[in-house]
Amino acid sequence: MSQARRKEYQNTTVRLPRGVFDQTKTAIQRSEAASSFNEFVVQAIKEKLNKLTESEIDAAFAGMASDPNYQRDSIALAEEFERSDGEAWCATENVHSKARPSKTRSR
């Protein structure tokens, strides 16, 4: 392994309950979930980290629902863009409602 490639990884030791270890080895052997025990563990950790990140984002958005400052700013923004949104919608409707020219075939 090249020196640059080796720096991308950190070795560690993990102690697992025997049952979890056995189930993981069986899952790897029976399916194509991962090509190795290490790959399975890395995938599991990444999945858990993604779920934690999503939970943090969800919690931040949930907080916005009860934040009076956010609610006030959100309403002000909606009111500010109400006219231009309506104009854009009307322009789009006019484009879609125009009849398309008929196609003629030359013989």
Image: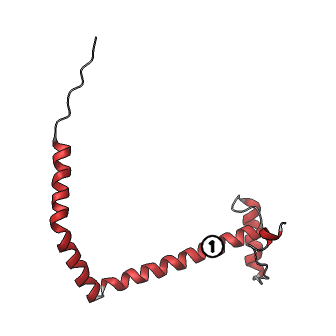
Quadrant assignment for the C terminus? top left
Percent coordinates x, y for residue 91 in the rendering = 17, 52
| Three-letter residue code for mark 1 | Lys
In this rendering, is residue 12 above or below 83? Answer: below
Position of residue 18 measured from the top left corner of the image (x, y, whole percent):
78, 80
Location of residue 36 in the rendering, given as x and y in whole percent from the top left corner: 77, 65
Q: Residue furthest right?
A: 1
* Badge count: 1
Locate residue 75: give its quadrant.
bottom left
Neighbor class of circle 1 (other Cα within 10 Å; few <14, some 14-19, many 20+) is few
Query: Circle 1 is placed at which residue position?
Result: 46
Judge by depth and name the residue closer to the eye, 71 or 87.
Answer: 87
Q: Where is residue 39 in the image (x, y as percent from the top left)?
A: 73, 67
Residue farthest to the front?
4
Q: Quadrant of residue 77?
A: bottom left
Answer with left or right where residue 54 lies relative to residue 90: right
One can see residue 25 in this view:
no
Residue sitting at 56 percent across and 74 percent down? 50
Please, what secondary structure does the residue beneath circle 1 have?
Answer: helix
Answer above or below: position of 90 versus 14: above
**Residue at position x 69%, y 72% in the image:** 42
Q: Residue at x 52, y 78 (%)?
A: 53
In this view, which residue lies farthest toward the top? 107
